Amino acid sequence: MADANDFVHAVKRAALDAQESTKPVNVYFGEVVSKSPLKINVEQKMILGENQLVLARNVTDYMTTVTVQWETDKGVLMPEGTTDAEPLHNHGVVGVKNFRMHNGLETGDQVILIRQQEGQKFIVLDRIGGKE
């Protein structure tokens, strides 16, 4: 009888595995509950730690290179306690420049995650609603 039960259990497991394999990804929603170390509460069911998370560039601080062409402000500086206006330093900014993008996750951020198929890793794609 035990062999028959084991067989039925194995068939059920194979059917569930086959059904699960037809879903290439599972999408989840979570909230950052700790910035350092990074922890995300997924759908109020489980807390994921840094070792379980793969961060997309959208949710990290990173350096990027951009081409710029602008003029600095043409306003005036009013030193505190005076009525004398001083012209600000004015000049053009042109060329290829490196900028640091501050997109790292913060406590309270709502995020979209994708679970790797048959894995324990979750890819954090982006924030919900963006970062102000």
Image: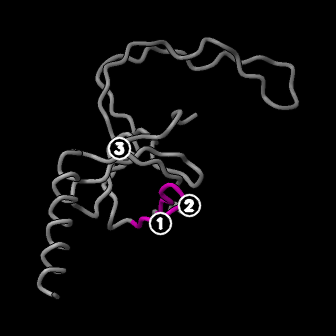
**Mark positioned earlier in the residue sequence (1 or 2):** 2
* Residue drawn where x is 50% and y is 63% of the image: 45
Chain part drawn in magenta: 39-49
Please provide percent x and percent y for residue 114.
33, 48
Residue type, label 2: Val
Label 3 crowd (10 A; few <14 / some 14-19 / many >=20): few
Q: What kind of element bears circle 1?
A: strand
Mark drawn on residue 84? none
Q: Is residue 88 left or right of residue 111?
A: right
Separation (CA) of disc 2 from disc 3: 22 Å
Mark drawn on residue 62? 3
Residue 60 seen in the current view: no
Residue type, label 1: Ile
Q: Is residue 121 left or right of residue 110?
A: left
Dot 1 and dot 2 residues touching (CB under 8 Å)? yes
Q: Main secondary structure of the magenta part?
A: strand
Q: What kind of element bears circle 3?
A: strand
Label 2 crowd (10 A; few <14 / some 14-19 / many >=20): some
Please provide percent x and percent y for residue 9.
20, 73
**Mark positioned earlier in the residue sequence (1 or 3):** 1
* Residue drawn where x is 38% and y is 48% of the image: 113
The mark tally for this picture is 3
Picture quarter with the C terminus: top right
Q: What kind of element bears circle 2?
A: strand
Most foreground residue, 12 or 61: 12
Separation (CA) of disc 1 from disc 3: 25 Å
Which residue is under mark 1? 47
Residue type, label 3: Tyr
Which residue is under mark 2? 33
Picture quarter with the N terminus: bottom left
